[in-house]
Amino acid sequence: MSPFDWAVLAAALAAMVAYGVWKGGRSRDADGFLLAGREMRWGTVAISVMATQASAITFLSTPGQAYADGMRFVQFYLGLPIAMIVVSAVAVPLYHRLKVYTAYEYLETRFDRKTRTLTALLFLVQRGLAAGLTIFAPSLILSVVLGWDTRVTVLVIGAAVVIYTTSGGARAVSRTQTLQAAIILVGMVAAFVAVVSLLPADVSLLDAWRVAGKAGRMRAIDTSFNLTDRYTLWSGLIGGAFLQMSYFGADQSQVQRYLTGSSVTQSRLGLLFNGIAKVPMQFAILLVGATVFGFYQFAAPPVFFNPAATAKARSSVQGPRFAAVEASYRSAHAEQEASARALVSALRRRDGGEGEAVGAYRAASVRSGALRAEAISLIRSSDPNADASDTNYVFLSFVVHTLPAGLVGLVLAMVFAASMSASSAELSALASTTVVDVYRRLLRPGAGNGHAVLVSRIATLGWGAAAVLFAEYASRLGSLIEAVNILGSLFYGTILGVFLAGFCLKRVSGTAVFGAAIVAEALVVACFVLTPISFLWYNVVGCLSVVALAPLFGALPRRALLAPATGE
Amino acid sequence: MLDLGVTGHRPPATGHVSPEEPLPLGATWRTLYLAVGATLAAVIALLALFTRAFE
């Protein structure tokens, strides 16, 4: 990295922290600290919910996803507009009318204390771990590609977030997210313009996209119905809608963002704007990745984008063989590049030679793909714990090795901004749930308003320290990342079912919902352990099971329902 | 502002939502929800066209 890149990165970091401290002010009451005084307009609410959902991994991994697997990942978000409509129509007016601070408060007014406490604790465990990963994941990628010390990166991100979130609470989070969103937008646009400008002079952007299309990277919609396929139109629309309803309707990190709206109208408009803008935004990020793929059809990529894994393979006993595979891969890619140029010419001529050119290009791709697979196999044999996927490293590797000085710093600032915006919202939500649902509900019900703000600040600091500590620990437990992500998807459907039962089933008691939630969770776990069903469908199973079983449990005699729970 | 001291356990609120400001262009919530749904349908159609154009 050049000194200019370091200057850009340092200036952006300092600006974000200073802006957060300045705009956050010094809130002296709980409304101000936990919900930004409920004074935000819809534009700020919209940016805030979008910035909270889009962490650094969104901007690092999504382009890599398009590079490796094509544009079909966009289908994951197709259920989001549906979820925005449902949450706006059902949850927003209810939360505003009850003037709750957290989503879980509603569950006590509707059901009972045990249901509120259970869901609040589930959120604290799940989101507390996720906050650590939000900081750790980009730190790991930065350490692999740039050689930075993971602990230092984790500490820098964690400290920066804690400073302004502890100082200004929810207001600082929302205001800073607007600046962070601007940095992210500028960074992504700059990266896209850069990759387009780096294409060979005789290859246009449309040419690059056409070649990517022939390699299957421009397929955005898959209408097949297959429960085991992770990204299809149907899994995105149905499973995705349930997942997003749970995330936006029952996860405090999002509920807190739109409760900062000054009215039902402002909160709703913010969510509906998200419903319109989110899919195109994800499409644009994926398109950057597909364009990077097009770029690498005319320039040699590394055989594997994770430089640390590659270096390890080179220095292992497999080193000589790995070097030979790398050399063969370079030759194979030169052939692939020639076939890609022939394909571009054929596509321009439109004289019927297109089919043959496509066949030659695909055959060349298969040959280089086989060599890449062999290289990955050698990497795995030199280090059995090595991750066989390099999707997370594609975009940053491209940025570091091809973009000019200044732009590298800007893209890295974008990564830091995304990580900070998501983790600050998580810390603020964790603090509000800790204070409102645990401290003030179970430990100190009579404490005053000023005391609550002080405890909120301490809770923010505590969760920030916990997130940093967990991120440090996670660096030694690579597989934990996947485990925690799966854990989160296992619970979302059931939690949504509890909330939907509260919203829609007027006569169902808390005990019936509690019993239904336990059975639903067992069904979800059974799906996970015993079937190959894709994780998006767990949300449907969990939610519908709670909504279907709760009335049945409600119709049972009270003693029959309580017997299993009390072990009788 | 609500005192946190009473947030622990409140009875369900029976009051109505506070009066809301008018929506942009005189729209109703129903039309806005329909607009979001129609936008989603249009986006899916565009994505399908995009897929066909580059296959």
Image (cartoon, coloured by chain):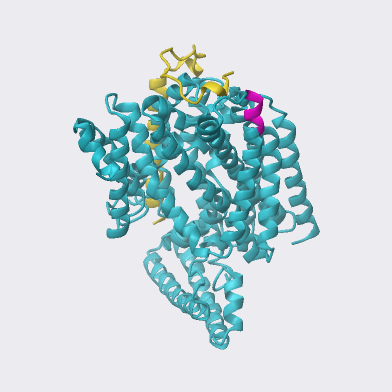
Using residue A271 as the reference point, say whether residue A417 is left or right of it. Answer: right
Above or below residue A274? Residue A212 is: below
Q: Quadrant of residue A37?
A: top right
Q: Please state which of residues A312 and B51 is positioned toward the viewer in this rendering.
A: A312
SS assignment for the magenta stretch, majority = helix
State whether residue A117 appears in this view: yes
Judge whether residue A1 is colored magenta: no
Magenta residues span A449-454
The N terminus of chain A, quarter of image = bottom right
Rendering coords of residue A538 (x, y %) = 33, 48
Q: Colour of chain B?
A: yellow
The residue at the point 52 percent across, 50 percent down is A129
Rendering coords of residue A223 (x, y %) = 30, 50
Q: Colour of chain A?
A: cyan
Rendering coords of residue A42 (x, y %) = 55, 26
Q: Please state which of residues A205 and A262 is positioned toward the viewer in this rendering.
A: A262
